[in-house]
Image (cartoon, helix red, strand yellow):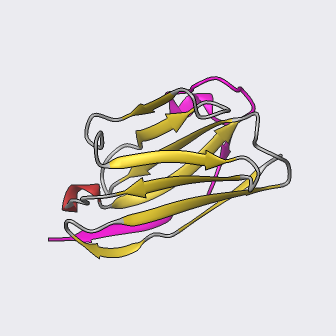
Amino acid sequence: QVQLVESGGGLVQAGGSLRLSCAASGRTISGYAVGWFRQAPGKERESVAALNWNGNSIIYADSVKGRFAVSRDNAKNTAYLQMNSLKPEDTAVYYCTADSDSRLLAYARQYHSWGPGTQVTVSS
C-alpha cells in the first residue's frame, strides 16, 4: 500500500502562488496514475488535475486551466501542483491521490490511495 502526504499549503493573497508537493512512500508510484482533488467547505470534492504514469497525458478542471500545472518526478516519488494567480474561490483542502492503474484517471472513485490533505486559503 502506498502512503501519500501533501505539503506546501498555506495562506496566500489573491494573485499569489503556491506549490503543493505529494510525497509517496511504501512503494514507488512511477507506474501509477496521480491526481489532485480539492474540497471547499460545504461543497463536494472536485477534480483539479490528473496525469498518467509518465506525465504525457494531463487533464485540468476548467476553473484552473492556464493557472495550475501538475507534474511528477518519478525519481523522487513525488508529484507537484503549481498554483499561480490564485483566487479566493481556490480556497479548499487539497488532496493528492494515486492508483496503480497507469492510465489517466479523472474520477475520485478510480483512486485507492489518498493523502490527508493540505489547506490552501486565498485571501481577497
- Tell me the quarter of the picture where residue 56 sits: top right
Question: Horizontally, is 120 left or right of 57 in the view?
Answer: left
Q: Residue at x 57, y 61 (%)?
A: 21
Question: Horizontally, is 84 left or right of 117 in the view?
Answer: left
Relative to 103, residue 42 above or below: below
Q: Residue at x 32, y 69 (%)?
A: 121
Q: Which residues are magenta?
A: 100-124
| Residue 101 drawn in magenta | yes
Q: Residue furthest top?
A: 103
Please say whether residue 34 is visible from this viewpoint. yes
Q: Nearer the viewer, residue 103 or 40?
A: 103
Question: Horizontally, is 83 left or right of 66 in the view?
Answer: right
Q: Residue furthest left?
A: 124
Q: Residue at x 28, y 56 (%)?
A: 90
- Tell me the quarter of the picture where residue 120 sits: bottom left
Instruction: Residue 3: give x, y in percent of width and height.
Output: 75, 55
Relative to 20, residue 107 above or below: above
Q: Nearer the viewer, residue 56 or 77?
A: 56
